[in-house]
């Protein structure tokens, strides 16, 4: 690069590395300085030339990598800490625990990361700049957790070269409105290299679980630690394929986890079962064969409490290969592929789940299982240097996630005497039965299939340096697809014996007299997709040698979520439910075209010595809600022959009373005390149909993307050599965020006696609809924080960062996935729902680092 008349120069879009930068000028000595670059960061390298000859060389102190001169708020974990931090489970998301401004749910888990007040589904995950987003769930693809809170697949720490979080996203990043979380993978080189590792976690270093201690105390014994065996092993390997031209880097990682999940569950005693049988005989009744088949799944214990040792298993294999082609001095192509496959099995909910006795089945009979979970990502990046001032970068990426979660048995309920109606083979399994003693059959809503979710992305950007300006322009196309099945066809039953006691519940179970029975009917396989196109421009203007101003703008267009076979409906106040593709409804809502997101900021070096930076930044980002938000309501409705039959009775008597009546499933309006099952007789009638009033969903015609305003003011100072302090004010404001609102709720103040339905706004026109939930843009959020960090790098062997965040987050709703907890309490005044965010943590202190001694290192 050649500097301008003022000595300023810019080298844009460089790979992460430690660079040796040399400055030469006729009549002066050559000066060398080292500068370390991380992803999305800006390093300031200044030179002071001494009079002499060019052949004379002066090596000066390296540029501190701790002081940044970008208007963006970047947080980074370098490769040394990535490899040395002792992270349980070796999940790269755990690196977020050692960053300011990040709230990571303790223990991790599904959608467990909030950054700068944004929702868990808003984070923009990338690997080498390629999308790692699951557009159905809103989580990562690689390292997404499955059923037991640990990742189904892993990217090993030894393969990661750099990990950054950009809290104020640049104009280059779109689709997701949250922080840009980017992993940069290592590459090969001319020298063959690699690593190998084996990690093992056994129970011999653990203390006993609380439930183990309590169970042992009852027996007068000492508790043993919970049995666990977690093994993670693998390696990385890299080197040349063709010296100086083609390099490769790859990894393999495997995991084998087996752990006992201890908890206490309420179970019947033999005496209680005998009392129930005696009462049935005294009433002149006989035990139902269905009851006999179900009671066998319940273990007994003289104390009425059984200490359960549930079986949890996770087996995972994952690998990756990256190839770098240096075609010539001007063209570099990077190709990579990631693939992972896993099996997981765990007790459903980890509490209240009955583990059957050995005579009835395996200990994991009612576990939830994923077999298998598949995750893959592939991508190509082509960097072309068109001139010494112009760089063209083109990216192609495709990710894939496939998973079915189901109970660990395919027992046909008809073999138990229970005729629940027609079932697909995938929906077979013991019905989910709930009693005061816990539940059998697993989670009633399972199986659920998300297979696959794919996201394809193509983008290109051009970076050009013109004097004091570094311009970057680009465009992208994004396509998201999901195939989903949510039949919920397995029957759920409740036997509480009129809530009169344990023996009454056993009487009801043995007589097969239940308070409630419900299941869904209809085919729910859906093929959903969404597309978007984005374009951006950004100008970094070096106004003075000490001051850089940045201005940017991103524009995006989003199509509405669509369904391949038009299997979707929407509610209209004048027409009711209308199916997609009929009556002029060619799309669920209008395409969103009004998404202009400006960016602005500055970076200032007040002392001119590179030891202090003052930075301000602002970003307006648009957030595409995950497809799973609108799927459950709009794509599964009674207008598409998808309906739920629910019998919920209010018994007058205990199950064995003389005056008990049974519900006629073919005439449910006649009522009855119990849903009385008989062997082979259809539980829901000979020809089940949905009975109004129905609960339905809708979306307004102007439904659009929510957006976030991000802003920060940051001061950074090098206090000692290799040590710095960073103080930031970081805030965000979320507007027009997705929220579920009940638009058919009775107005506040309506009489509670009599028929509440009569006061619903749409009752007169549509009496067949009760709850009408609309996906709206009424959500809002407010986040303010003070973030303080102290960073030590290579100081007497210490490489550590200390972070403290003082923050406050309030919102109307903290997510858009949980229908029960994320719906407006008062739909007529959304502000009544304002309160602390579900992830609001006022004080958050964390640290992470390592101490190196000659020949080894110890992390902490």
Image (spheres, helix red, strand yellow):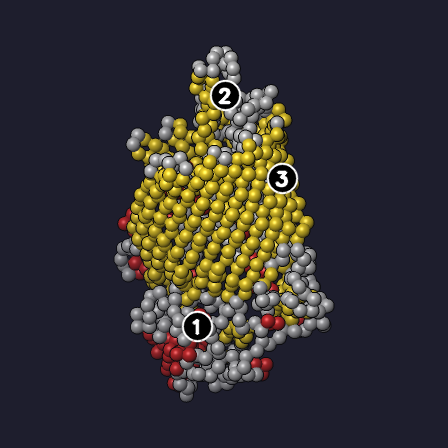
| Residue at 61% across, 39% down | 473
Mark 3 residue element: strand
Q: Is residue 756 visible?
A: no
Residue 266, position in %: x, y? 39, 66
Disc 1 on helix, strand or loop?
helix
Question: Badge 2: how crowded within 10 Å, few (<14), some, or many (20+)?
Answer: many
| Nearer to the camera, 243 or 596 | 243
Which badge, 3 or 2, comes first in the chain's sequence?
2
Q: On the rendered structure, is 654 left or right of 757?
A: left
Q: Which residue is mark 3?
A: 537
Sooner in the amino-acid sequence: mark 1 or mark 3: 1
Identified at 39% across, 56% down, the residue is 341
The x, y position of residue 498, in whole percent, is: 49, 75
Query: Residue 343: which quarter of the image?
Result: bottom left
What's the mark number on residue 23? 2
Q: Nearer the viewer, residue 304 or 328?
A: 328
Evaluate if marks 1 and 3 touch, with contact meaning CB atoms under 8 Å apart.
Answer: no
Q: Report, in whole angstroms, how far the alpha carbon at label 1 lies from the one at label 2.
A: 72 Å
């Amino acid at each position: 690069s050649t500097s301008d008349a003022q000595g300023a120069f810019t080298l844009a879009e460089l790979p992460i590395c430690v660079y040796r930068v040399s400055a030469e000028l006729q009549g002066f000595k050559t000066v060398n300085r080292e500068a370390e670059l991380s992803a999305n960061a800006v390093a300031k390298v200044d030179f002071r030339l001494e009079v002499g000859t060019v052949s004379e060389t002066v090596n000066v102190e390296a540029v501190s990598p701790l002081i940044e001169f970008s208007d963006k708020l970047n947080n980074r974990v370098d490769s040394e800490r990535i490899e040395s931090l002792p992270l349980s489970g070796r999940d790269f998301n755990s690196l977020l625990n050692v960053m300011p401004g990040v709230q990571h749910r303790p223990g991790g888990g599904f959608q467990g990361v909030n950054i700068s007040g944004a929702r868990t589904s808003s984070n923009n995950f990338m690997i080498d700049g390629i999308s790692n987003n699951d557009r159905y769930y809103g989580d990562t693809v690689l390292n997404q957790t499955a059923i037991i809170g640990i990742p189904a697949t892993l990217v090993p720490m030894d393969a990661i070269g750099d990990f950054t979080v950009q809290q104020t996203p640049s104009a280059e990043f779109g689709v997701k409105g949250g922080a840009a979380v980017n992993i940069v993978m290592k590459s090969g080189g001319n020298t063959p290299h690699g690593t190998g590792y084996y990690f093992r976690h056994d129970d011999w270093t653990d203390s006993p679980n609380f439930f183990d201690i309590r169970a042992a105390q009852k027996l007068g014994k000492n508790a043993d630690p919970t049995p666990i065996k977690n093994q993670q092993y693998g390696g990385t390997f890299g080197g040349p394929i063709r010296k100086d031209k083609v390099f490769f880097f790859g990894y393999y990682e495997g995991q084998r986890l087996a752990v006992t999940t201890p908890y206490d569950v309420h179970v019947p005693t033999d005496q209680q079962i005998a009392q129930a049988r005696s009462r049935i005989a005294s009433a002149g009744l006989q035990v139902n064969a269905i009851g006999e088949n179900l009671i066998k799944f319940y273990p007994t214990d003289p104390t009425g409490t059984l200490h359960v040792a549930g079986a949890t298993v996770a087996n995972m294999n994952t690998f990756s290969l990256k190839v770098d082609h240096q075609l010539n001095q001007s063209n570099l192509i990077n190709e990579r592929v990631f693939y992972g496959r896993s099996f997981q099995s765990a007790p459903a909910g980890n509490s209240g789940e009955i583990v059957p006795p050995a005579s009835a089945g395996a200990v994991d009979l009612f576990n939830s299982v994923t077999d298998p979970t598949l995750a893959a990502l592939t991508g190509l990046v082509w960097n072309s240097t068109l001139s010494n001032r112009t760089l063209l970068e083109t990216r192609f990426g495709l990710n894939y996630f496939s998973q079915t979660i189901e109970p660990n048995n395919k027992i046909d309920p008809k073999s138990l005497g229970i005729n629940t109606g027609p079932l697909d083979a995938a929906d077979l399994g013991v019905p989910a039965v709930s009693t005061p003693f816990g539940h059998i059959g697993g989670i009633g809503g399972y199986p659920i299939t998300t297979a696959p979710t794919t996201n394809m992305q193509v983008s290109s950007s051009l970076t050009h340096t013109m004097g004091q300006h570094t311009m970057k322009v680009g465009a992208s196309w994004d396509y998201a697809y999901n195939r989903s099945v949510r039949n919920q066809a397995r029957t759920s039953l409740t036997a509480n014996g009129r809530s009169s006691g344990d023996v009454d519940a056993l009487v009801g179970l043995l007589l097969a007299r239940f308070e409630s029975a419900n299941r869904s009917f209809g085919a729910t396989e859906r093929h959903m997709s969404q597309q978007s196109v984005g374009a951006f421009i950004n100008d970094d203007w070096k106004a003075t040698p000490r001051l850089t101003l940045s201005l940017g703008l991103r524009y995006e267009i989003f199509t509405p979520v669509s369904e391949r076979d038009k299997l979707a409906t929407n509610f209209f106040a004048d027409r009711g439910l209308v199916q997609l593709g009929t009556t002029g409804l060619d799309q669920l809502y209008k395409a969103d075209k009004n998404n202009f997101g400006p960016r602005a900021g500055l970076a200032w070096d007040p002392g001119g010595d590179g030891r202090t930076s003052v930075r301000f930044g602002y970003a307006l980002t648009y957030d595409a809600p995950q497809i799973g938000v609108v799927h459950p309501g709009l794509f599964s409705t009674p207008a598409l022959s998808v309906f739920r039959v629910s019998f919920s009775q209010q018994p007058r008597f205990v199950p064995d009373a003389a005056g008990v009546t049974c519900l006629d499933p073919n005439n449910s309006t006649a009522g009855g005390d119990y849903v009385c099952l008989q062997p082979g007789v259809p539980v829901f009638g000979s020809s089940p149909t949905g009975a109004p009033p129905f609960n339905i969903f809708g979306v307004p015609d102007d439904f659009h993307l929510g957006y976030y305003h991000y802003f920060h003011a940051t001061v950074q100072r090098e206090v000692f050599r290799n040590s710095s302090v960073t103080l930031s004010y970081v805030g965000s404001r979320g507007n027009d965020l997705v929220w579920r609102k009940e638009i058919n709720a009775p107005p506040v103040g309506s009489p509670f006696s009599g028929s509440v339905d009569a006061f619903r706004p749409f009752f007169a026109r549509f009496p067949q609809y009760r709850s009408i939930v609309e996906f709206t843009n009424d959500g809002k959020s407010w986040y303010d924080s003070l973030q303080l960090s102290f960073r030590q790098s290579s100081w007497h062997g210490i490489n550590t960062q200390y972070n403290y965040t003082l923050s406050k987050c309030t919102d109307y709703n903290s997510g858009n996935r949980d229908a029960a907890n994320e719906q407006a309490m008062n739909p007529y005044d959304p502000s009544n729902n304002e309160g602390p965010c579900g992830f609001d943590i006022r004080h958050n202190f964390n640290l992470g680092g390592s101490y190196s001694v000659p020949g080894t290192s110890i992390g902490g």
